Amino acid sequence: MLDLVASREIPVVFGLPGVHNLAFWSTEAPVRVVGVRHEQAAVYAADGYARATGRLGVAFSTTGPGAVNGIAAFGEACVSGSPILLISSDVSTALRHADGPRGILHEMPDQAAPFAAFGVRAVTVTSAEQALTELATALARAESWPGQPAYLGVPSDILGAPWTGPLPDVPAAPAPPQPMVDDVARLAELIRACPRVVIWAGGGVTQCGDAGDRAVMALAERLGAPVVTTYAGRGVMAGHPLTVETSVHEPEVGALIGGADLLLVVGSGFDAMNTKNWKMPLPARTAAVGLGDELPRTIDWDVLVRADLMATLGALEESIGDVDRQPWNQLSLREAIRTRVKADERTAAAVEFVEAVETWPSDAVVVTDMCIPGYWTSSHAVQPRRRRLLNPVGWGTLGFALHAAIGPAAAGIRTLAVCGDGGPMFGLGELATYVQEKLPITLIVVDDGGYGMLRFDQKVFGHDERGVDLVTPDWGLLAQSFGIPFTEVHDGATLQAALAESARRDGPSLILQRAAFYPPASTSPRWFETEPD
């Protein structure tokens, strides 16, 4: 099976050995196998690898508890549209009973069922030939959009059986639906009727690579349209004067969108977290181009084109005719917003943190957790390229960053993981993985003594603080116990210096900052506190 993975130029997979999956470990693997300390980390690492590279991320686990240990990470990949494949061993077909479980070690009645609950392909095979065919199909589906995670269960006797036949060919990726001529014509007519258009670009544009970037840029320049991006779209049209490189949750950006004639959403699911539960300011007319099943359920669109993004943008380029407009928004919103939040004594320290993180090398990756410093980084840090920011806002899984950073780092990409003090406690054992695999990961921990975002939520909702204050380790001693270089910083200047030093190291580093940042406007308790009149 790993030979077939290697044939698609996937250089690394992630997993944990168990009594039923030792076949993955018993031979010379044609790809690098990164062993982690918990199955959740293996699946998160596969997700991080997929997001950073655009290739299929592969994880494997052992049977029963090993498989279900990865469900939280698998769900994050599903909701965020990351192309991953989890291959798990299952109990031997020779030991199973036709009437149901009989007490085999790690046995479940239907091990694939929890993964199928996410609406993705999840199968348990009954032959080696079927296992290879399913793997080839997963490899093909990973190259389509939206991303399609999959689960593949392989009974241990099949997994360990020799295979002497040829490897199956990987089929062509399924062709996405092509746009209907009438749909494109309706969208073009709407654009021509609306002088002030805002383009909302999401992860679908990122998935299309340079071609997607160029297509959106060409449309934006013809329409003179400012471009805002979702978390998954960060880095699209990086540095372009039409790109609004800041959070869509800030009131100035809301006013820009609400003051337009048309919001055109491209390659985005237009989800609740990006849109303030669909209550953000919207113009009178809205249109979208995308493939996600959720898109039709979000708002009532004037025009919705459910088709291939590149084909639709290409057809639209011809259909809108001789439209050639000057930019209608002359304000540099990013600079204005940055100046405002930096001048606010509540948020100044957080902005200083963001500006230090922005000095991280442009060819490196930034992975954020569900924590206040992560929210600031993902919503406000300018990203110089696509696939640089990896963010778990799809399903919102705390503990993402420390684990997911393993993926890009194992592919040789210098990686920065931005965490609070709560998230790393989900997987401190993976620090051993960092060291053993010599991974180029810099882990930043901003320690505010607990779940700072939940503490803020309780305050806003008028609740007493309860369950949010945590005992945290001596981070310096923890790093020392693993042989990881450790630095404690106190402000943006010392953080910037520590980041520069850690970026020069071959292996991992741990940086600690003790601070309690005020949450950014992208967090739900602050969504509506500063809406413009």
Image: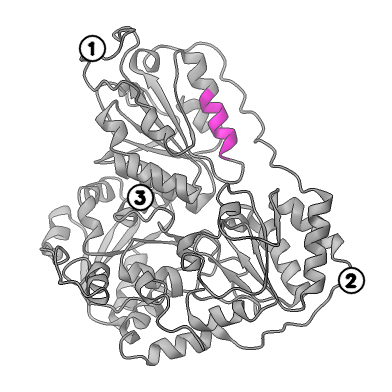
Q: Which residues are magenta?
A: 134-142
The correct choice, above or below, for 270 with respect to 435 in the image is: below
Residue 384 on image: x %, y %: 54, 70
Is 162 situated above or below 503?
above
Q: Which residue is mark 1?
A: 102
Residue 7 at x, y = what percent? 55, 31
Q: Secondary structure at mark 3?
A: helix
> Given the image, on which type of amino acid does mark 1 rest?
Arg
| Residue for badge 3 | 406
Label 3 crowd bin: few (<14), some (14–19), many (20+), radius 10 Å? many
| Amino acid of disc 2 | Asp
Residue drawn 69% across the image and 42% down it: 176
84 or 106, nearer to the observer:
106
Chain-order first, disc 1 or disc 3? 1
Left or right of residue 13: residue 37: left
Relative to 423, say whether 6 is above or below: above
Determine the CA span between mark 2 and mark 1: 71 Å
Q: Residue at x 66, y 62 (%)?
A: 213
Mark toward the start of the polypeptide (2 vs 1): 1
Q: Which residue is mark 2?
A: 322
Numbered disc in front, either 2 or 1: 1
For discs 3 and 2, the disc positioned in front in the rendered view: 2
